[in-house]
Image (cartoon, rainbow, N blue to C red):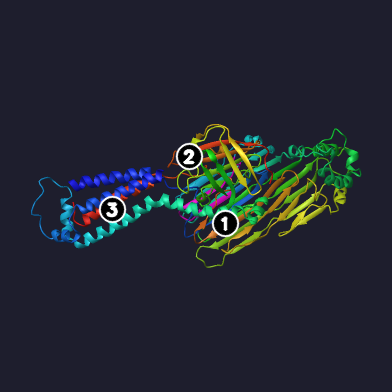
């Protein structure tokens, strides 16, 4: 009995010590599916970075772990600023199914983010089902139209150095471009009332906006029947319109009138980044893999503009190439396009890297666009599954579970007690 | 301080255990006694008596129980030592990050905005609570083993906008252990590969739910948001400190 009291005292002391010890650490853990058969697919259609802020426009993620899990997530409005949940469907038992197709989703908040003037959004969708034969998971990310507020940034670029009352580097850089386009040197266009690059642009063009980005949704799907597992990821096309003008006469007679009404000065069209992989469940036939990288075309709205810049009216940028639009290089409007590649990784899973575009690099870092990343795999072993980029569920855990040391203390007490019994002590 | 108290308590626990062991007979004499009926039966009712009798008759059970007690002891020791291990790990990692932060390669990557997750990004100093650690890029579990990590979706330190940094409240060096002690006006200094800037705490720390990611939402003004778990040893809430940039933002 005396020993029992001693043990109780020890146990109490251990628990007290455990309670005082710091808790264990934890943090957001990558999700992992484990299954003998199944597949994953992921597609990111657009990531926009404006002055250091990042927004993912459309992303989709699908997982199928046969007999155990079908899970699909399509992003709604992806920005770390918002807590709106993505469209998420999941099925965890054979015969179960789930469809999430919201009629409306929050979108107005997006325009409250600095750098975004307008956002029109079509909601994301997700569906998941498990059947005796197989199952399916399918996610469609949000479709949206974005108008970044570049003009706000352009208005911060002064044409003259206020301290030295001299022509600034900005004006020096812009002069060849403006002269080539309008036939008039920049200094003849600028008066004392013109202070910024935006003032000059407004003189030359009447703009609807400075840039417009139209994003088709990202699609990710994994399907299976009794014989085959197929995963498919598709980052669909994106159109970027630079300097879309506002109707007829919008060039203020400073540019040749060969620019069709309402057409942007430059249109960048990004094709699809698409991958797919099919595997027979019994391994009787080899896996079939397809991948294609996005091909980019740059089209100038006016042949005269293209001529002034010294380029063809339409330029095609193939995979693995980089193009900085001639004529804009060295100016605040410098715009470069990188087209990555498509292929098959070391695990035999296809990927297609889309396009990264730096718009107006000379303006406070400009606007960065990363588009068309698609990857997919059919897994006969476990595959790691990354959640859609901006589906930031929670602030990261940095404290953890404080119960672990207490459990440790309790276990130590049990160990001591067990040891005493093993030795035959009461 | 808490480690000293904890270590003292653990030592006291083991000392007590040793004292208990010394107050009993040796293992050899005990095992001998197991083979004989007790000559002085206890006057009270001992609920463990059937178990003890069973163990006296089955040597295999005694050995199994003995082995189990050793395993349990090791697991318990691991659980109790875990926080100390994480602090040691973080300390060694910080030494490597110290060197990385001043390397030309990192400066180049920083300017190209391509610092990888887990790589050194900036140094944070909070004189009021004695914080001086290197912050890494990213807030994944592995990145945060460095103690503090930068929210990758927020601007780089010292840039315009709302810069977010998460740090451990407990374990892994627990750099943000005393974040709740900050008061308005306290200085927070960030030293990046391209410059140094100072923020001042705007208001007293406040608590939000983990799902409230609006605290790291973009903003126009230069701001710094520090987050950590709350209360200490729990992840049920997050403690948030908001600070305002003093002077012009640094453009990378």
User: Could you say whether the residue bearing mark 2 is in a helix, strand or loop?
Assistant: loop
Residue B97 is at least partly visible in this image: yes
Q: Which one is in front in this view, the residue at disc 3 or the one at disc 2?
A: 2
Residue under label 2? B178
Q: Pinpoint the chain carrying mark 2.
A: B
Seen from the viewer's position, the closer of residues B198 and B79 is B198
Q: Where is residue B109 in the image (x, y as percent from the top left)?
A: 65, 53
Q: Which one is in front in this view, the residue at disc 1 or the one at disc 2?
A: 2
Distance from Cα at disc 1 to Cα at disc 3:
50 Å
Residue range in magenta is A60-80
Q: Pinpoint the chain carrying mark 3.
A: A
Q: Residues within 10 Å of mark 1 (few under 14, many from 20)?
A: many
Left or right of A136 on screen, residue B68: left
User: Could you say whether the residue bearing mark 3 is in a helix, strand or loop?
Assistant: helix
Seen from the viewer's position, the closer of residues B123 and A211 is B123
Residue under label 3? A415
Distance from Cα at disc 3 to Cα at disc 2:
35 Å
**Does residue A65 belong to the magenta stretch?**
yes
User: Could you say whether the residue bearing mark 1 is in a helix, strand or loop?
Assistant: strand
Q: Which residue is drawn at 37% across and 44% down?
A: B5
């Amino acid at each position: 009995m005396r020993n029992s009291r001693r043990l109780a005292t020890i146990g109490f002391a251990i628990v007290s010590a455990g309670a005082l010890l710091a808790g264990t650490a934890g943090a957001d853990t990558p999700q992992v599916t484990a299954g003998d058969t199944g597949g994953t697919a992921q597609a990111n259609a657009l990531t926009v970075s404006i002055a250091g802020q990042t927004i993912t426009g459309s992303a989709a993620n699908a997982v199928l772990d046969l007999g155990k899990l079908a899970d699909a997530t399509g992003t709604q409005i992806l920005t770390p600023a918002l807590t709106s949940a993505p469209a998420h469907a999941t099925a965890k038992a054979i015969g179960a199914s789930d469809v999430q197709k919201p009629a409306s989703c929050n979108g107005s908040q997006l325009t409250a983010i600095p750098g975004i003037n307008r956002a029109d959004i079509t909601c994301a969708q997700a569906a998941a089902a498990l059947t005796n034969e197989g199952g399916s998971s399918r996610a469609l990310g949000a479709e949206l139209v974005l108008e970044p507020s570049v003009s706000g940034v352009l208005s911060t670029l002064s044409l003259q150095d206020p301290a030295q009352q001299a022509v600034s580097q900005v004006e020096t850089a812009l002069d060849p471009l403006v002269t080539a386009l309008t036939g008039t040197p920049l200094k003849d266009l600028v008066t004392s009332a013109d202070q910024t690059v935006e003032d000059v642009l407004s003189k030359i063009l009447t703009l609807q906006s400075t840039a417009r980005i139209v994003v088709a949704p990202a699609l990710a799907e994994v399907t299976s029947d009794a014989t085959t597992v197929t995963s498919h990821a598709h980052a669909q096309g994106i159109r970027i319109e630079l300097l879309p003008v506002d109707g007829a006469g919008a060039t203020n007679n400073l540019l040749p009138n060969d620019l069709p009404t309402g057409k942007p000065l430059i249109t960048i069209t990004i094709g699809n980044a698409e991958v797919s992989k099919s595997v027979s469940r019994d391994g009787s036939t080899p896996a079939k893999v397809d991948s294609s990288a996005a091909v980019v075309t740059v089209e100038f709205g006016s042949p005269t503009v293209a001529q002034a810049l010294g380029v063809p009216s339409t330029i095609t940028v193939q995979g693995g190439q980089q193009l900085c639009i001639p004529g804009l290089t060295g100016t605040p409007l410098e715009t470069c396009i990188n087209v990555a590649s498509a292929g098959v990784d070391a695990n035999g899973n296809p990927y297609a890297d889309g396009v990264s575009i730096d718009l107006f690099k000379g303006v406070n870092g400009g606007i960065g666009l990363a588009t068309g990343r698609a990857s997919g795999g059919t897994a006969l072993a476990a595959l790691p599954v990354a959640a859609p980029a901006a589906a930031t569920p929670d602030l990261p855990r940095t404290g953890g579970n404080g119960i672990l040391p207490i459990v440790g203390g309790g276990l130590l007490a049990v160990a001591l007690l067990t040891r005493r019994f093993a030795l035959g002590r009461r | 301080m808490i480690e000293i108290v904890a270590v003292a308590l653990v030592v006291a626990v083991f000392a007590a255990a040793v004292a208990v062991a010394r107050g009993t007979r040796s293992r050899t004499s005990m095992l001998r006694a197991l083979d004989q009926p007790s000559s002085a039966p206890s006057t009270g009712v001992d609920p463990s008596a059937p178990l003890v009798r069973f163990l006296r008759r089955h040597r295999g059970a005694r050995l199994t129980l003995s082995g189990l007690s050793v395993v349990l002891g090791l697991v318990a020791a691991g659980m109790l030592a875990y926080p100390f291990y994480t602090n040691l790990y973080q300390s060694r990692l910080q030494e490597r990050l110290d060197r990385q932060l001043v390397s030309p390669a990192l400066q180049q990557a920083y300017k190209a905005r391509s610092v990888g997750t887990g790589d050194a990004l900036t140094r944070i100093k909070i004189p009021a609570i004695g914080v001086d650690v290197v912050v890494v890029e990213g807030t994944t579990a592995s990145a945060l083993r460095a103690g503090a990590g930068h929210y990758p979706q927020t601007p780089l330190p010292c840039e315009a906008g709302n810069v977010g940094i998460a740090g451990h409240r407990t374990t892994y060096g627990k750099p943000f252990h005393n974040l709740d002690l900050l008061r308005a006006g306290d200085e927070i200094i960030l030293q990046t590969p391209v410059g140094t800037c100072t923020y001042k705490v705007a208001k007293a720390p406040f608590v939000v739910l983990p799902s409230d990611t609006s605290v790291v939402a973009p903003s126009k003004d230069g701001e710094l948001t520090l987050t950590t778990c709350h209360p200490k040893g729990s992840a049920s809430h997050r403690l948030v400190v908001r600070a305002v940039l003093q002077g012009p933002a640094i453009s990378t």
